[in-house]
């Protein structure tokens, strides 16, 4: 469980990135954060693992108070909280496996890391993580030899190798083309449900947020201005968050829905109208009809 | 049909003068006049302070104009630079920079009486020595093979140790990979000090401190000197490479809970590895040359042999060593080029 109580973030240059954020995110929830550029989505996510230190209020992650000043406590917390980035942030010159093993750092003695001599158990964990994202056959390829979608899967495997309680994802699919974006999101959603991991994801496109999240948080100018289950995040509500009317780009590219139909394994059917104007649509589009989905929302 | 028509159409169209293109703004004439005045002032100053008495005469009808030779040449170069700058519409600052460059170069040359005219004067002296270079004593070069080995071995040991230590220092010096700012700053300062002393300086120092070939410690002094020289170079070049690594993987390592050493090893080292290997090979090439040079100050190896033969005026031997040196350096360059190609 992650709780924000009246959390402020003031950047070193005096800019207020977050102000008075109150949030409770339960275990196993899949939360999407939406908002215009500069709304503070990245700031919020980075506060949770201390990449951005918060300056007021209290933040607890999994029952422990987050202390941005103590380096060892931070490392301890980060070992339980994985992060996925828009630009994948892989070391492109080394193998996929070694990238995934990076996720084992917090559980590996320093001398082993320095020599690159990982334990067999850690390698096994890395292989299992790669299996989950379906690219175990690429383990010994250089990361640079992979496509964008594959690289983001490696990044997901790296996070899984941490055996995390929480996965933070800062626009994980923003640099992928729409069909690939959906595939990666589907993988993430499936894994998150299989392992009961809490997922907090920044999103640019509303249709992605509505398709995959249990709950949507809307941000504007460093504050949370909407927080509710996906079914309540209607266009009208999001327009209120954005303070302007929605454009086709906000929702998704039109051709996405078309290409999704062509996907052989797509478990969900995208609405024929990509603008998804009805509130009910958001709910109907829940991608994985897992029985737990509803109850997890209820635990909020 | 269209294909036949279009070239005919294109012909006259190409000849039509293009619409007026934007041109760079003309620099201010006043500033260029000021720069010209500066050139005149520099000319007068050079004239007043000249040490060479050479004078250039310019017959102009009845009158014979004259000017001091070197300052006049300098003045003409300055005017030419200004003319080119004006023609290419160079900004005032850049033109001033170019002019100052000429003035400073002239001034520096004049202080040390730099002039190529003395070479022909010394030609008769040089001739005998130069002739030796056409009949090098090859048998001698192979006779001192152990000195060659000493030089090569010094270079190898110094490269291996120096590059490794340089890598560590570069890691500590770069703010990207160092534990904290004070450490980074102080190691950077230390690196600058190490770098400010040239290889021969280190060699003289270590020979004085621990003794040279006379005590059988020459190669040790040589390796230590090269080591310091290498640390300076690698720490500098690699430090700059580390400063520029992409921050994404570093952030990812942080977010995964890696500690500093793990982060540097996982996210920084792989990114700078090609640079490091490349610099190490470069340093090895430098070391072959440098270990010859510092041999002259008494650390042994082929450099010491070279200075010995020079003192004996055995020019045939000197020539043979120099030729062999060229071959060795070329071989090392080829070798490192070969490795580099494999690694990139
Ligand atoms: N390191 C920083 N120092 C100062 N201000 C910052 C810093 N990082 C972000 N900000 C400011 O904080 C505000 C919120 O930034 P944030 O990155 O959280 O926005 P975002 O919602 O993620 O936007 P985007 O969708 O463009 O990623 C912005 O106005 C930004 O300029
Ligand atoms: Mg952002």
Image (cartoon, coloured by chain):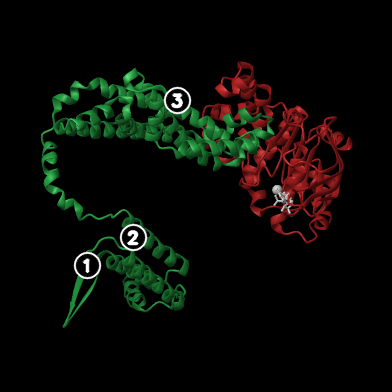
Chain colours: A red, B green
Chain name for mark 1: B
- Please state if A200 lies on the left or on the right of A101 as rendered: right
Q: Residues within 10 Å of mark 3 (few under 14, many from 20)?
A: some
Q: Which comes before the other along the chain, label 1 or label 3?
A: 1
| Residue under the point 55% across and 42% down | B243
**Label at residue B132:** none
How far apart are the two marked residues, 1 and 2, measured between alpha carbons? 17 Å
Q: Which comes before the other along the chain, label 2 or label 3?
A: 2
Give the percent coordinates (x, y) of residue B40: 36, 72
Q: Check if mark 1 and mark 2 are on a common chain.
A: yes
The residue lying toward the viewer, choosing from A237 and A265, is A237
Q: Secondary structure at mark 2?
A: helix
Q: Residue A96 appears in which quarter of the rendering?
A: top right
Is residue A110 at all visible to an observer of this figure?
Answer: yes
Residue that mark 2 sits on:
B106
**Label at residue B161:** 3
Give the percent coordinates (x, y) of residue A86: 65, 43
Which of the two marks, 1 or 2, is nearer to us in this view?
A: 1
How far apart are the two marked residues, 2 and 3, measured between alpha carbons? 43 Å
| Residue under the point 36% across and 62% down | B102
User: Do residues under tags 2 and 3 come within 8 Å of each other at their CB atoms?
Assistant: no
Which of the two marks, 2 or 3, is nearer to us in this view?
A: 2
Q: Which comes before the other along the chain, label 1 or label 2?
A: 1
Q: Secondary structure at mark 3?
A: helix
- Please state if B217 lies on the left or on the right of A210 as rendered: left
């Amino acid at each position: 469980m992650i709780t924000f109580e009246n959390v402020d973030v003031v950047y070193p240059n005096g800019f207020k990135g977050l102000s008075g954020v109150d949030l409770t995110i339960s275990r196993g929830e899949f939360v999407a954060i939406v908002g215009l550029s500069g709304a503070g989505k990245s700031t919020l996510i980075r506060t949770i693992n201390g990449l951005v230190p918060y300056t007021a209020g209290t933040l607890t992650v999994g029952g422990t108070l987050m202390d941005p000043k103590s380096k060892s406590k931070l490392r301890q917390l980060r070992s339980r909280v994985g992060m996925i980035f828009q630009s994948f942030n892989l070391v492109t010159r080394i193998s996929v496996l070694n990238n995934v093993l990076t996720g084992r750092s917090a559980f590996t003695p320093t001398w082993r890391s320095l020599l690159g001599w990982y334990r067999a158990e850690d390698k096994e964990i890395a292989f299992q993580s790669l299996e989950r994202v379906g690219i175990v056959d690429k383990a010994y390829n250089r990361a640079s030899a992979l496509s964008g979608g594959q690289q983001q899967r490696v990044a997901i495997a790296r996070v899984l190798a941490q055996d995390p309680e929480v996965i933070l994802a800062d626009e994980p699919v923003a640099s992928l083309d729409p069909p690939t974006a959906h595939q990666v999101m589907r993988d993430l959603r499936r894994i998150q449900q299989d392992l009961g991991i809490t997922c907090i994801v920044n999103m640019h496109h509303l249709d992605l947020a509505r398709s995959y999240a249990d709950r949507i948080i809307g941000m504007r100018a460093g504050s949370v201005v909407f927080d509710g289950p996906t079914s309540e995040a209607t266009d009208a509500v999001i327009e209120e968050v954005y303070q302007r009317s929605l454009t086709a780009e906000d929702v998704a590219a039109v051709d996405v829905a078309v290409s999704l139909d062509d996907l052989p394994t797509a478990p969900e059917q995208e609405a024929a109208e990509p603008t998804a104007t009805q509130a009910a649509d958001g709910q109907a589009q829940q991608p994985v009809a897992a029985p737990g989905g509803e109850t997890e929302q209820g635990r909020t | 049909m269209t294909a036949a028509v279009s070239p005919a159409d294109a012909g006259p169209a190409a000849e039509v003068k293009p619409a007026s293109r934007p041109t760079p703004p003309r620099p201010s004439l006043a500033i260029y006049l000021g720069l010209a005045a500066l050139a005149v002032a520099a000319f007068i100053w050079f004239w007043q302070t000249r040490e060479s008495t050479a004078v250039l005469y310019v017959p102009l009808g009845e009158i014979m104009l004259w000017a001091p030779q070197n300052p006049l040449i300098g003045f003409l170069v300055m005017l030419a630079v200004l003319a080119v700058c004006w023609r290419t519409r160079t900004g005032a600052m850049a033109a001033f920079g170019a002019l100052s460059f000429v003035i400073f170069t002239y001034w520096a040359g004049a202080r040390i009486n730099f002039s190529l005219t003395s070479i022909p004067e010394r030609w008769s002296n040089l001739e005998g020595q130069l002739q030796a270079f056409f009949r090098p004593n090859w048998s001698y070069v192979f006779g001192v093979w152990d000195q060659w080995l000493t030089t090569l071995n010094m270079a190898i040991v110094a490269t291996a140790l120096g590059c490794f230590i340089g890598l560590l220092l570069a890691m500590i010096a770069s703010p990207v990979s160092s534990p904290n700012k004070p450490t980074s700053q102080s190691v950077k300062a230390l690196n600058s000090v190490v770098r400010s002393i040239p290889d021969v300086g280190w060699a003289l120092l270590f020979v004085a401190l621990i003794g040279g070939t006379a005590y059988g410690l020459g190669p040790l002094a040589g390796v230590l000197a090269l080591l310091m020289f290498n640390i300076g170079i690698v720490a500098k070049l690699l430090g700059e490479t580390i400063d520029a690594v992409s921050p994404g993987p570093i952030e990812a390592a942080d977010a995964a809970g890696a500690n500093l050493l793990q982060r540097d090893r996982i996210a920084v080292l792989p990114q700078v590895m090609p640079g490091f290997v490349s610099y190490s090979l470069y340093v090895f090439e430098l070391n072959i040359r440098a270990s010859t040079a510092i041999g002259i100050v008494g650390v042994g190896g082929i450099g010491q042999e070279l200075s010995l033969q020079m003192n004996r005026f055995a020019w045939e031997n000197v020539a043979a060593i120099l030729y062999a040196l060229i071959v060795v350096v070329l071989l090392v360059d080829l070798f490192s080029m070969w490795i580099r190609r494999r690694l990139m």
